[in-house]
Amino acid sequence: MAGPRYVADPPGAIASVDLEGLTALFHARSGTTHILAPPAPQILQALAAGPADADEIAARLAAGFDLAAEEDPAAAISARLAELEAAGLVWRESPSSPTSGAKATACGQPSG
Amino acid sequence: MKHRFELRVGPVGFRIGSAWRGPVEALRRLYAGYPQPEGVCDFTVRLEPERPWRRALRPSVALRGDYMLPGAAPLALAHGLLAAEMGMNLQMALGQRRFLLLHAAAVEREGKAVLLTGHSGAGKSTLAALLGERGWRFMGDEFALLDPESGLLHPFPRAVSLKNESLALFGGVDPARLGPVMDGTPKGTIRHLRPPAGAVARMLEPAQPVRILFPRFDPDAARDAREVGAAEVFVRLTQASTNYVALGRRGFVALTRLVSSVPARAIDYATSEEGVRLVEEHWRG
C-alpha cells in the first residue's frame, strides 16, 4: 500500500503542547488551533523528516513506537492522514516538486 | 460629545461620551474614587440618540465607539448605566490586544488569583462579588486579563452588575456603593455595585493564577466538585476568550501555559453560601 505522499509544515511553523494525552497545536500559517489525539501528532512529527506515504510513516513510527503487528498500521495511518489533510495540516506532495511540497507549486511560486 | 466622563479600570482607560447628562452623572456617582486614565484613553464609548431627533422624544441610547457591532439594539435612556457598561465591555471584547481576555471573574488572596469562569448565569459575578465582601480581593466579574508575557492575571474591577435574585444578597453594603435599580432591562432587574475601596486602590496589582474554577449555580443541583482535564479546560477557555484568535501564537502560548500549570475544578452549588464555601475549600488544591 503505497498511496499518496504527504507533506507537513516544518516544525517551526507549528507550536504544540501536550495536555494530558491530547495535543494542542497552533498552526501558524492558518492561525487555527487544533486538538489532536494520538497518533495524529506522531504522524506530523514523522513527516517533519520529509514527505512520506503511509508505509514510510509507519516505518518511521516503528522506530520509536511498538506498532501492533496483527493490525495494519499503514491503513490506520492513511485514515489519520485523510483527517489531517481535511484539517489543512498536511497536503499531498506534487509530482513535479517531490521535495519542496505541493503548496509552493500550487500557489505558482517560482521554484528557482 | 456634550457630556464626558473618563476613568481607568485596571490597566485600561475609557472615555465615555453621552448626548445626555443622566448616564454620565450616574457613572460619576457609581465610579466615585476610580482613577483617571494616564495619557490617551484606550477606548471610547459613545452613548448617542438612536436618531438625532430622538434625544428628547422617547429617548433611546445607541452604543457607538471605536469598535462597533452592527445591529446592536438601542436601550431605554433609563438604562443608560447598562448601556455604558455594555459599551465598555464591547470595546474590550473587540479591541483588546495587550492581554488575553478571558470571560471570567477573578478574586485574589495572599497574592494568588482564582479564576471563575462559565456561561452567563453560572453565578461567577455573584460569587466573586460575595467573596470580595469576605476578605478576598475582588479583581473583576466580567473579564480577567491574562498577560501573555508574564502569565499574571491583571484586575479589571469594573462595577459588578447584580441581577435579579442576587440583588438581595448585598442588602448590607453601603448604599453609596449601589447604582440605581434598573427594572425591565434585557437581562431583568439590574443594579450595579461599586467594588470595595481596596479592590479599586489595588487595580494595577496583578496576581499569579493558582486555580481555575467552573462554578455552576443550580437550585436543584447536588453540591459537587470534580477535576477538569487540561484539554477540556483549554477548549472551554478558548471559547471564553473574545480575542484568543486575534492574538495568534501569543494567545496559544499564554493559554496553554495557563492550563498546563493551573489545576481546574468544576463546582456545582445550590445556594450562594454553598458556592462561597466550595471556593474556600477548593482554591488551594
Image: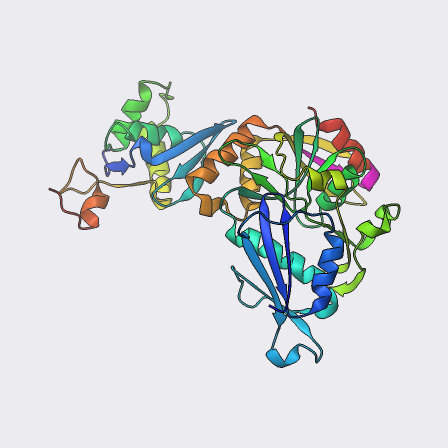
**Picture quadrant where residue B163 is located:** bottom right
Tell me the residue at 63%/48% (across/down).
Answer: B8
**Is B266 on the left or on the right of B168, as rendered?**
left
Q: Is residue B216 left or right of residue A36?
A: right
Task: Tell me where residue A79 appears, x and y as whole percent.
Answer: 36, 38
Q: Residue at x 53, y 52 (%)?
A: B40
Task: Tell me where residue B55 appears, x and y as whole percent.
Answer: 66, 76
Asked if residue B211 can be seen in this view, the reply is yes
Residue extending furthest toward the right? B172
Q: Quadrant of the N terminus of chain A?
A: top left
B50 over A75 or under it: above or below: below
Q: Is residue A5 left or right of residue B29?
A: left
Rendered view: B188 above or below B119: below
> Does the magenta-highlighted stretch encompass residue B268?
yes
Which residue occupies the foreground of this view, A83 or B203?
Answer: B203
Q: Position of residue B56 (x, y in %)?
A: 70, 78
User: Is B79 a magenta residue?
Assistant: no
Residue closest to the far left:
A112
What residue is drawn where x is 70% and y is 60%?
Answer: B82
Out of B219 and A75, give the one closest to the viewer: B219
Res. B186 visible in picture: no
Q: Is residue B28 above or below residue A36?
A: below
Location of residue B218 in the rendering, given as x and y in whole percent from the top left corner: 77, 45
| Residue reaching furthest to the front | B39
In the image, taking residue B90 as reference, residue B216 lies left or right, namely right
The residue located at (80%, 53%) in the rendering is: B178
Q: Which residues are magenta?
A: B264-273
Q: Is residue B88 above or below residue B80?
A: above
